[in-house]
Amino acid sequence: GQQVMQIPQYQHVQEGEDFTTYCNSSTTLSNIQWYKQRPGGHPVFLIQLVKSGEVKKQKRLTFQFGEAKKNSSLHITATQTTDVGTYFCAARMYSGGGADGLTFGKGTHLIIQP
Amino acid sequence: EAQVTQNPRYLITVTGKKLTVTCSQNMNHEYMSWYRQDPGLGLRQIYYSMNVEVTDKGDVPEGYKVSRKEKRNFPLILESPSPNQTSLYFCASSLLTSGSDPPGEQFFGPGTRLTVL
């Protein structure tokens, strides 16, 4: 089936360094959502991007949606230990009509070394 | 408090013994969904429902059944569980404003860890 590729799978950073995770699709995406899952927890919604080229910021987090609506990124500036967890993108694959299921990327595990 | 609840939270069972994992939400959401999470595979959608009596297959529906008789409840049924269904299961719900709009923010339940021996 249709897939959303997310890279990298793991990212080790020193506290204070920046972090970026990327999601890519071979097909046009209707929208893209980002979630964070803390170890032992459940996914928690961060943001949804809908428009081509859209950029949204939440404090140290910057989310981008590509012009062609086939890729997206999440960038964290100056990571903190509270940023530890797995970050997932999720996309509704454009079907031309009607709601569709959500496809999640496999996630990027962010590990922070103090 | 707005929430999605799942029961049980932990379950150990044996191959072939039918089981049901319940999911309930109190936010009047139209869209409900079940996911399984496995190491290295991320979250994969099993089934979803856009409203009462409307269900559809996700990416990995084999071996699972669902029903949506009421808006707030979306149980996941394993008629004959097998060891490859050992996983962490999440239920989620969200608003769905119309049939052509994407599901909005997904609210996830706490998860059900299932082990099939």
Image (cartoon, coloured by chain):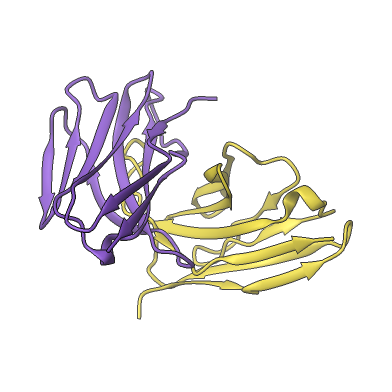
Chain colours: A purple, B yellow
| Image-based side of A90 in relation to B113, left or right | left
| Image-based side of B115 in relation to A20, left or right | right
Q: Residue at x 10, y 58 (%)?
A: A59
The image quarter containing residue A6 is: top left
Q: Nearer the viewer, residue B19 or A111?
A: A111
Q: Nearer the viewer, residue B52 or A68?
A: A68
Q: Nearer the viewer, residue B73 or B46?
A: B46
The image quarter containing residue A25 is: top left
* Vertical order, B4 against A27 (above or below): below
- Residue B103 image point, x, y percent: 36, 46
Q: Nearer the viewer, residue A66 or A113?
A: A113
Quadrant in which the N terminus of chain A is drawn? top right
The image quarter containing residue B63 is: top right
How many marks on residues? 0
- Residue B73 image point, x, y percent: 55, 66
Q: Residue at x 72, y 55 (%)?
A: B86
Q: Residue at x 27, y 66 (%)?
A: A82
Quadrant in which the C terminus of chain A is drawn? bottom left
* Vertical order, A56 against B90 (above or below): above
- Residue B48 image point, x, y percent: 53, 47
Q: Residue at x 16, y 27 (%)?
A: A52
| Image-based side of A66 in relation to A106, left or right | left
| Image-based side of A46 in relation to A42, left or right | left
- Residue A30 image point, x, y percent: 30, 31
* Vertical order, B99 against B97 (above or below): above
